[in-house]
């Protein structure tokens, strides 16, 4: 079977990380999570460092400040980081799942031709997880991530009282800067204005993109995504 790319996108709190981890475990694909790519960059790079992309400078410190308010990172900045990840994964012959990128039309227009060249359009599958604004705010203001691997733990009755990550055993914590109610409202508006139009872009450019109801149980959403990407076993 040819190497595959699966793109998972949706509003903040849609369960992109959770579903991508499940798919990664089931299919054996590498999980490329844009938030982790950013966190790694922000943690390891000097805040005074400047990246120059297409003749424009992007300062790491300013990108961190914007990120903490809930605003999207500058598209050329994150695109530069993600494209490097794509190329490394292709060189290693990896199938992979992407969550959190692309988030804007600029990113899609830069990233999708590269993925198509590296993997072929027929091997790129896209699932859009849909949830309401109310669910977005509730999930994000209640969710936790683990300290060690930054796994995002979707909030529900089963996970409400968890203190340790079920995947790696580290302490579960809250992201104070990104998951407070005001920041979530900013992130949600950013999603509506800048990410939601991607569905039309994917359709217009003949990519395999399907919508999935993200308000069902984790297991049901997982099965729906497998069906959407043509990997259900039923």
Image (cartoon, rainbow, N blue to C red):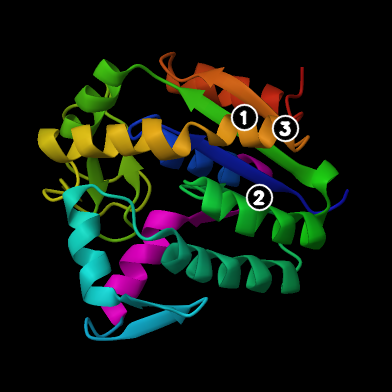
Local secondary structure at mark 3: helix
Q: Nearer the viewer, residue 51 or 180?
A: 51
Whether 123 is among the magenta residues is no
Q: Furthest-right residue in view? A: 1
Please state the horizontal and vertical placement of residue 209, each as a whole percent of the image.
68, 30
Q: Residues within 10 Å of mark 3 (few under 14, many from 20)?
A: few
Quadrant including the C terminus: top right
Callout 3–callout 1 Cβ contact below 8 Å: yes
Q: Residues within 10 Å of mark 1 (few under 14, many from 20)?
A: few
- Residue at horizontal 62 percent and vertical 59 percent from the top: 110
Q: Which residue is mark 1?
A: 200
- Residue at horizontal 45 percent and vertical 20 percent from the top: 214
Q: Nearer the viewer, residue 131 or 147?
A: 131
Please state the horizontal and vertical placement of residue 25, each as a whole percent of the image.
57, 45
Please state the horizontal and vertical placement of residue 12, each as a whole percent of the image.
34, 35
Q: Earlier in the sequence, mark 3 or mark 2?
A: 2
Nearer to us: label 3 or label 2: 3
Q: Which residue is mark 3?
A: 204
The boundaries of the magenta stretch are 26-44
Q: Earlier in the sequence, mark 2 or mark 1?
A: 2
Label 2 vs label 1: CA separation?
29 Å
Q: Which residue is mark 2?
A: 28
């Amino acid at each position: 079977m040819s190497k595959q790319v699966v793109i998972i996108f949706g509003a903040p709190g849609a369960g992109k990380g959770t579903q991508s981890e499940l798919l990664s475990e089931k299919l054996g694909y590498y999980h490329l999570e844009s938030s982790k790519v950013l966190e790694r960059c922000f943690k390891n790079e000097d805040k005074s460092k400047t990246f120059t992309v297409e003749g424009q400078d992007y300062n790491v410190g300013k990108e961190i400040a914007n990120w903490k308010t809930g605003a999207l990172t500058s598209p050329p900045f994150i695109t530069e980081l993600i494209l490097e990840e794509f190329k490394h994964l292709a060189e290693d012959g990896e199938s992979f799942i992407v969550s959190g990128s692309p988030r804007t039309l600029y990113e899609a227009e830069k990233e999708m031709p590269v993925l198509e060249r590296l993997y072929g359009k027929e091997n790129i599958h896209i699932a859009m997880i849909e949830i309401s604004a109310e669910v977005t705010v509730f999930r994000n203001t209640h969710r936790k991530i683990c300290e060690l691997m930054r796994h995002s733990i979707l909030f529900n009755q089963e996970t409400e009282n968890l203190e340790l990550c079920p995947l790696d055993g580290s302490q579960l914590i809250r992201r104070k800067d990104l998951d407070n109610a005001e920041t979530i409202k900013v992130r949600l508006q950013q999603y509506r204005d800048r990410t939601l139009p991607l569905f039309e872009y994917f359709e217009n450019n003949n990519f395999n993109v399907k919508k999935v109801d993200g308000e069902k149980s984790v297991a049901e959403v997982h099965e729906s995504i497998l069906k959407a990407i043509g990997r259900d076993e039923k």
